[in-house]
Amino acid sequence: MEKEKRSPHIILASQSNLKFKETLPIKWGAQTAMERGPVVASNTNHKARNAIGAHSGSYTVYRALSIASGKFPPMHRPDLNNTQSPVKIGPYPQWKDPLKMVTVDPWGLDPQLNFKPLFEEGYDIRPTISVTQAHLQIPEINEAIDKGRLQVDGSIIRENRDVCVTKVAIDPVWYLPGVAERLNVDEGDLRRILFQETGGMYPEFITRPDLKVWLPPIGSSTAYIFGKAEDLANPKVELTCRVHDECNGSDVFGSDICTCRPYLMYGIEDATRTAQRGGVGIIIYYRKEGRALGEVTKFLVYNARKRQEGGDTAATYFRRTECVAGTEDARFQEFMPDCLHLFGISKIHNLHSMSNMKYDAIVKSGIEVVNRVSIPDHLIPQDAQVEMEAKKAAGYFSKEPKKTTEELKKVTGRAIKE
């Protein structure tokens, strides 16, 4: 049997008559999956596409290279048999509110089940969320056990000291009208700026105002759940949460210029402890390297801080970032709570975050926060004191008093060659 091939004919987004009978409508925030409609961004049938962009976020480029080299079949459709979630997640009331989640597609979890009739009709609907279960092996957890802060219970922490978790991978799916409203901008202006700032990569922003959903070429988010996933939506069950933005240098390689890995590990330890006492913990890991400015910019800022007159001081911590990048922070935490709403969360008993931007975004989204938890002083690396004191002075949550300007000048990090 001859293999199915994709036509070499290019369909330009500027061409007219690109709406076909196969194109399914999307009613964001509808009450059921079928009423809402699936997000179809696969290329196996261009007539069925109802979204801008492509699946797999930043990995689309690698897929394109693999197809171009002949190592990846362009018409491949994933076999989703036995890929469904091992735990039940949703639906929750937040799934039926068009403004609660504007960067996550909750019905993208197990679409082969949510949209079974459409699958049977031949629609190529890809998952944008997947769930599995795993064991974590973390040196800091071993240390916590050795020091008696955690106990091996055979359930949350196994006899070999593995921590049992449920992992959830979440690809970004943006509902453009909701994104515009969240940012308090006009949708047309948002589409124009997205078109310009991506180098004209997506003409549909301008030519296809009927397409309201975009799969942006950015990194995904991952949630790690400690305890029962269904308890996340129960406000009566104690919930410990850490919303963590990616920091490859610290999280993976242990760089000591910031507090990212220590704070992440402290959050994991406390989430584990909460699960052991009958609660539930969640860590959500967002790909926003270097405050969404990237590692190249981050390393340039490190150099500028350490070479400036007076050395790397807490007094000039944020200013050097703004000088290099044009802004202190590009993360726009207004979107961050979407992943919390995916799990039906309405109350966080222990929030591990000193960031007021994160806290304000969570509370503004309708989630109650009972207790905020800052990183203990003994976990802060010496070179990261600059970052920590600068953040406290800038208004980050802390129970300690802010240092004066003169005191901040005395908080210095290593020289660049040390």
Image (tube, rainbow, N blue to C red):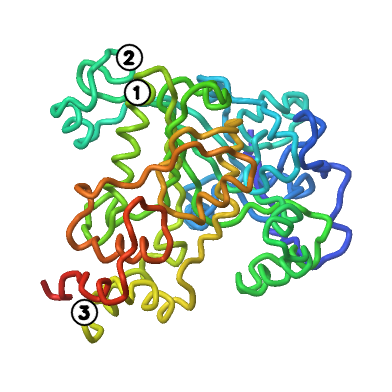
In three-dimensional space, the C-alpha distance between marks 3 and 1, rounded to whole angstroms, equals 44 Å
- Residue 321 drawn at (x, y percent): 39, 74
Q: Nearer the viewer, residue 247 or 319?
A: 319
Query: Is the residue 189 above or below the residue 62 in the image?
Result: below
Which residue in the structure is indicated by mark 1? 164
| Mark in front: 3 vs 1 | 3
Q: Is residue 409 visible?
A: yes
Q: Is residue 300 visible?
A: no
Q: Position of residue 289 (x, y in %)?
A: 41, 59
Rendered residue at 16%/33% (across/down) = 143
Label 3, label 2: how far apart the Cα atoms are: 49 Å
Callout 2 amino acid: Ser
Instruction: Tell me the kind of residue under disc 3.
Output: Gly
Tag 1: amino acid: Cys
Residue at x 29%, y 80% (from the top left corner): 304
Q: Quadrant of residue 31?
A: top right
Is residue 231 depicted above or below 326 in this figure?
Answer: above
Q: Is residue 166 above or below residue 189?
A: above
> In the orientation shown, which residue stands out farthest toward the top?
154
Location of mark 3 (residue):
311
Q: Which quadrant of the view contains residue 159? A: top left
* Labels 3, 2: front one: 3
Residue at x 27% of width, y 54% of height: 250
Q: Secondary structure at mark 1?
A: strand
- Residue contact at pointers 1 and 2, CB within 8 angstroms: yes
Give the camera-side residue of 177 and 64: 177
Residue under label 2: 155
